């Protein structure tokens, strides 16, 4: 009995240390206030997006939740207003799986909102399927929709600078690759419906995020707009809600014990959005509130440029 108690106590102690040193991670240290500033955050109605939006609202920003679901977004708006005491939190409809919706959002925003200081491309999904434009779902939502949105809003960001674009990528980008033949012929990052196929395609989409930030930074040189990509950490959120019930059951114990909660998961996004002095690091990749080296394929100039050109075509910009 005493041996069992000792082993149990040791396990709890090790987990406690692991949680506070590794799992919980670093915290954004910026004390920046955002009164008079306007922020757009995609997918701001749930998970780390909602937590990020709440923090920015507490700092005084006008926060626009750009989301697909009106019901969920309006509920999030009410929650954030109540918890932050800031009534400058609003919902605008945006479906990243529809290029028409992205264009409509940008048009409405530019007509009704005089400022844009911070664009946080946070939304992402993990599921197969096709968008209404015939793109692979994870290509369309995780990359192309944000690519188009960012480009349509760049002039406003430049007018209101210094401003920032923050792109939520993932460490999964290290397992990704870009098959341009598949992109051109299938309008997708991969084919197949298996668990491994889905994981690979998700990783490919996260590599697109990192390459987008890399190329965008080059094109923003000489302006007062900077951009950053990031890994938020392994998060216990709703990202995998579209996975099979078997997969969800298998990963639930792991996510509960070893994944960050949404508050911890929002910290690197907040660091990239707010931290003073990181402007020279535009285009770089962050994790745990610090700049990190990405894999070589995520900083490949030729691939990043080609992806940009293909993305212009798929998004209708060219």
Image (spheres, rainbow, N blue to C red):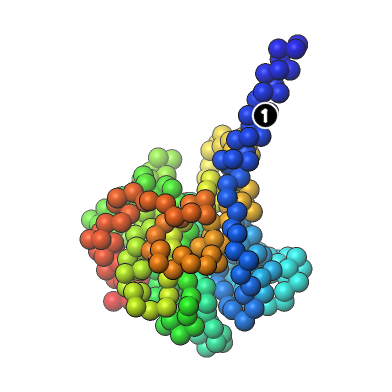
Tally of numbered tags:
1
Could you tell me which quadrant the C terminus lies in?
bottom left
The vertical placement of 92 against 126, above or below, is below
Nearest the eye: 48 or 71: 48
Nearest the eye: 1 or 137: 1
Rendered residue at 46%/85% (across/down): 159
Rendered residue at 63%/73% (across/down): 33
Percent across and percent down for residue 155 are 42, 83
- Relative to 4, 192 lies left or right: left
The vertical placement of 191 against 81, above or below, is above
Percent across and percent down for residue 298 are 33, 54
Could you tell me which quadrant the N terminus lies in?
top right
Rendered residue at 52%/88% (across/down): 111
Nearest the eye: 297 or 6: 6
Q: Which residue is mark 1?
A: 13
The vertical placement of 318 against 175, above or below, is below
């Amino acid at each position: 009995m005493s041996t069992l108690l000792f082993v149990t106590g040791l396990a709890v102690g090790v987990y406690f240390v692991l949680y506070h040193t590794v799992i919980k991670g670093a915290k954004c240290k910026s004390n920046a206030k955002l009164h008079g500033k306007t922020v757009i955050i995609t997918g701001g109605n749930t998970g780390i997006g909602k937590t990020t939006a709440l923090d920015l609202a507490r700092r005084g920003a006008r926060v626009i939740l750009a989301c697909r679901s009106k019901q969920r977004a309006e509920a999030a708006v009410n929650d954030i207003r109540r918890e932050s005491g800031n009534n400058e939190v609003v919902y605008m409809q945006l479906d990243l799986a529809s290029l028409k919706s992205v264009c409509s959002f940008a048009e409405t925003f530019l007509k009704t909102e005089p400022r844009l200081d911070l664009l946080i491309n946070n939304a992402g999904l993990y599921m197969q399927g096709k968008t209404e434009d015939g793109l692979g779902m994870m290509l369309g939502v995780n990359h192309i929709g944000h690519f188009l949105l960012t480009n349509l809003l760049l002039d406003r960001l430049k007018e209101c600078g210094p401003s920032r674009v923050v792109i939520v990528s993932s460490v999964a980008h290290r397992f990704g690759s870009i098959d341009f033949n598949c992109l051109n012929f299938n309008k997708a990052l991969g084919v197949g419906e298996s668990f491994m196929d889905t994981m690979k395609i998700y990783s490919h989409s996260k590599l697109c995020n990192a390459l987008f930030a890399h190329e965008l930074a080059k094109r923003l040189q000489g302006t007062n707009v900077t951009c950053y990509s990031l890994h938020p950490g392994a998060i216990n959120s709703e990202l995998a809600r579209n996975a099979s019930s078997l997969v969800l059951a298998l990963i639930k114990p792991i996510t509960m014990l070893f994944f960050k909660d949404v508050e911890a998961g929002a910290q690197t996004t907040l660091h990239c959005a707010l931290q003073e002095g990181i402007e020279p690091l535009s285009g770089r990749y962050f994790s745990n509130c610090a700049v990190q080296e990405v894999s070589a394929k995520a900083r490949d100039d030729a691939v990043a440029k080609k992806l940009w050109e293909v993305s212009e075509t798929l998004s209708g910009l060219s």
